Amino acid sequence: MDLLNTLVDKGLRREPLSRAEALAVLGTSDDDLLDVVAAAGKVRRHWFGRRVKLNYLVNLKSGLCPEDCSYCSQRLGSTAGILKYTWLKPDEASKAAAAGLAGGAKRVCLVASGRGPTDRDVDRVAGTIKAIKEENEGVEVCACLGLLSDGQAERLREAGADAYNHNLNTSESTYGEITTTHTYADRVDTVQKAHAAGLSACSGLIAGMGETDEDLVDVVFSLRELDPDSVPVNFLIPFEGTPLAKEWNLTPQRCLRILAMVRFVCPDVEVRIAGGREVHLRTMQPLALHLANSIFLGDYLTSEGQAGKADLEMIADAGFEVEGADQVTLPEHRASAGGCGSHESAGCGAHEGGGCGSHESGGGCGSHEGGGVCGSAASTATSSSTAAPQAGEARTDLVAVRRRGAGTDLAPNA
Ligand code: SF4
């Protein structure tokens, strides 16, 4: 396809796509899907080789949020049966982080539910960052605490945070249908505050909330303008007990097209598959590694992911390699500008997502939520179900609320 050749050329030269080109990627047919993946894969390999960065979510404070983000299992009025607990102590958070790092993660994403932190909360998280950094040399730490007030990003930076995650989630024009307790502009403001404080900005989206192709292109183009170093792509996990519980709109093919579009629009940026990976990509997860260069290891914020060991095996089987702590994530031109993964900031060496992405989306960070499946229910279901899933079919069998790791007495999945 001429279109794909053009998009590869643009991706390799970091030339902006037009909106029509981005929409055309989303509009491709299933017959063309492997060609789309192959084309976007060229761009991915040009900037990131075959490396896959692993990120690990630590949910510092779960549930009981006063905000009303419709996609979020931690929202005001949510009846989802998630874990609810207040702030983990620094040593508890550090222990959870260590499990993820031992499993191969190089970034820890510290996420807390709520509209945004108080100054006291920031001090508390500063202590947690310090504890994690003292015990794990070279670790990248990203904070995801909601909307930031003046001075808080600087305080987090001083405490050693490398990155800050806050997702835009959806287009400006539909934001008010998803959340009423804060605005799209509030979210943009926080990403800009993180940037201005020298934190590596992490900001992404949630697909599958009933949005149009135009909405998806709008939010990805807005992200491009904000110029984050990492973009988590969440696929909505429609939690029972939330307003979007019936929004099963995604197919594996649709998810791949979305990831390809994000890769073409943000060619040299860390594109991270966040919450909903196991639920919506299912057996197509390995193909998505040709598009994204980053995933979450193990569980999400409020839901379980497939076993960490299965993540590692998938990466190896697909012919990719886990990015080491000594490898710089971002391409040279971004890393030398101080982005995460730079020697300087990453000394972290280097700050999202995953993480967190948004406070939620289902759990993966990347957003506060967004994701989370598997492990148990999900992986079992994908391997033993005999009926072929239909497009857009509700796969509640793949959604398992997190019952292990942070906030519990059970070992984390890493
Ligand atoms: S996404 Fe964050 S702010 Fe919104 S309801 Fe969930 S925890 Fe609260």
Image (spheres, rainbow, N blue to C red):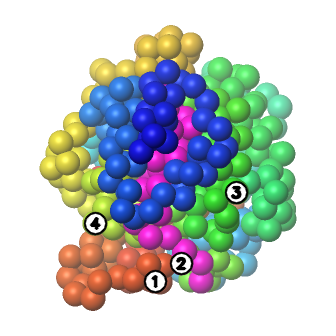
Please tell me how crowded label 1 is: few (under 14), some (14-19), or many (20+) other residues with Cα within 10 Å.
few
> Is residue 22 positioned above or below 9 on the image?
below
Measure the alpha-carbon separation of dots 2 and 1: 6 Å
Q: Are marks 4 and 3 in contact (CB under 8 Å)?
A: no
What residue did someone put label 3 on? 215
Mark 1 secondary-structure assignment? loop
Q: Is residue 124 magenta?
A: no
**Real-space Cα distance between discs 3 and 2?**
17 Å
Ligand 1 placement by image quarter: bottom right
Q: Earlier in the sequence, mark 3 or mark 2?
A: 3
Q: Which mark is residue 393?
A: 1
Q: Residue at x 59, y 46 (%)?
A: 22
Q: Kindly report the distance in space between the C-alpha atoms of the residues bearing marks 4 and 3.
A: 27 Å
Residue 140: x and y, percent? Answer: 45, 30
Report if residue 161 is visible in the image: no
Image check: 194 left or right of 395? right
Would you name the residue on which mark 4 appears? 283
Picture quarter with the N terminus: top left
Where's residue 80, x and y in %? 58, 80
Q: Is residue 263 above or below residue 237?
A: above
Q: Residue at label 2? A: 248
Q: In the displayed structure, does residue 285 sit left or right of residue 279?
A: left
- Is the residue under label 1 in contact with that under label 2 (CB below 8 Å)? yes
Mark 3: few/some/many CA within 10 Å (<14, 14-19, 20+): some
Q: Amino acid at mark 3?
A: Asp
Q: Residues within 10 Å of mark 4 (few under 14, many from 20)?
A: some
Of circles 4 and 3, which is in front?
3
- Magenta residues? 246-274
